[in-house]
Amino acid sequence: MLNLLWLVPFIPLAGFLILTGSEGRLPRAYAPWIGAGSVGLSAALAAALAFELLALAPEARVFRQTLWHWMAAGDFGVDFAFYLDALSLNMLLVVTGVGFLIHVYSAGYMADDPGMARFFAYMNLFVFAMLILVLADNLPLLYLGWEGVGLCSYLLIGFWYEKPENGYAARKAFVVTRVGDTAMALGLFLLFSQLGTLDIQEAMARASAQWPAGSTLAVATALLLLGGAVGKSAQLPLQVWLPDAMAGPTPISALIHAATMVTAGVYLIARTHVLFTLAPDVQALVAVVGAITLLMSGFSALTQTDIKRVLAYSTISQIGYMFLALGVGAWSAAIFHLTTHAFFKALLFLGAGAVILSLHHEQDIFRMGGLRRSLPLVFWTFVVGLAALVALPFTSGYYSKHEILLGAYGSGNAGPLLWAAGTAGAILTGIYSTRLLLVAFFGTERTPARPHYGSNIGVPLVILAILSLAGGLAKLPLFPALPEAGTEEAGGPIGLLTTAAPFLGVAIGYLVYRTGTASAEALLKLPGGEALRRLWFSGWGMDWLYDRLFVFPFVALARLNKGDAVDRPYQGIVALTRLGHRLLAPTQTGQLRRYAAGMLFGAALILAVGVWV
């Protein structure tokens, strides 16, 4: 059975090729069957592989498969090969399982869209690229998948390319993530040049044997890989692209910008965790980046009015928790939260999509209200998703986030500070989640809702709701793919405070947005209140800052260089050539006497030079 591993990524690729090759000539009804069916087959195969791999002893849970020799030049060679262990298996199940449910949902969401076949083709290509990324046995193949998901992200964010703002959002995501990708590419070059291998497992083994802890090479490589991770996972300082990426269709937001692609950076750090343990300062930096990002994004989510942007900032914040876990060495807890987050965030995005469809594409939560009565299925599944996001007990999010926070507390001298940041983030999560629920689903109905979804939308919502509740019981054992060290838990008062934090956030949100005990309007009237709201609403002014640091100077330089100064020397050569042509052209008269006279004059000149010089 394990020999069928190659089919898991290649079945979605076949779906992409069929949909692309048919160029829209297939009946519309075929597109969702091909798109969702191919990913469903992959999910079923991945589940079967999981049963076989997990039946083995922990130390034997590794399977390599070489399909062909990809590159060969002298002693240098790269295979197109896959590597399946507990870590890649976990990602395999998330990508294909959640991806299949989102594909089924898309069949209903995109039913009226004229570009439905193109949409499913892009989705299948994305799933293929993501599976290549997580199954890659070597660095070039991993980078191929990494860039593949970046390309698909660009295509899907700008899917409705008729709107200029969608094209801008797609370009912004592409350019910002390229910054991180460049750093990552340099890190991979450094690994190969210093360790002499492109095999990931061999590179980690050689790094562990050759590089002392804290060595310059280990620190430089870890920093460069961290640059790639923060770009793809939208962490500080490269998080600015994700909120604007919500311009794409909502299923895209669920698949790429919540459940799978943005977690690629988390996977990269986990896969190369040996390098980060050799660079303790960089690993600590990972935790700090995560802690700051989760707090900043939590405050921003608190002020957004677009339902998808609330969830986008929430996604950045939750990935911040994963980075925090990686930074404190709670490797398994990070991947556990990656898994549960995929369940409840996909549920929330798909629920938001059902709301948007039913409200004729209205996305402002302050123009909603009263949806619990008109959209009961969406309401109850949304409640489950928010409960898991807030990390209320007995939901999947509770188990994973609790593990991260207690792991952070016991991680060393900085542990209590990191735990405090994570706990404050949990309070913020409770506040903005309660605000979202109360404003959109309770109170007076401001926009009439007409339920616009069938079973292909409802069934994925119900399944994801079940997973959001029970997913905490489905934690895969990741040892020995990831070390278990660094997850020492703290109990007593710390455990109680960690559990109480989400309830405190929900209570604050209820008092502000339901009872009016502490009105949000009154808070804004405090000195500096409105300025603070605008700062948080703008994502802490990061776009403003980057505009002035990079965009405006670049645009000004481009305008100054409108004539392209680099071309001037070449244009001078062209002008000299044309001048020479104009001067010499009159000598070409076709009269032999003039040519003979010229030859004699030239010969005399050469002789004179030879005699007198």
Image (tube, rainbow, N blue to C red):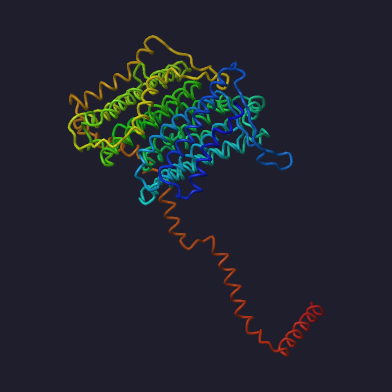
Residue 128 seen in render: yes
Residue 439 located left or right of residue 144: left
Residue 290 appears at what percent x and percent y? 44, 28
Do we see residue 224 in this rendering? no
Count of numbered marks: 0
> What quarter of the picture does the C terminus occupy?
bottom right
- Can you name the residue that lies furthest to the right here? 611
* Residue for point 47% across, 28% down: 94
- Which part of the image, by quadrant, shows the N terminus? top right
> x and y percent of residue 48 in the render?
53, 24
Task: Compare residues 71 and 14 and report the one nearer the observer.
Answer: 14
List x then y, in percent, for residue 402: 40, 18
Residue 342 position in % (x across, y down): 42, 28
Q: Tell me what residue is drawn at x 22 percent, y 27 percent.
A: 513
Q: Residue furthest top?
A: 492
Q: In this view, does 154 lie above or below 85?
A: below
Position of residue 269 in the picture relative to residue 514 (left or right): right
Is the residue 585 above or below the residue 573 in the image? below
Specify the quadrant of the image occupied by residue 461. top left
Q: Of 133 and 232, which appears nearest the observer?
A: 133
Given residues 377 and 239, the one toward you in this image is: 377
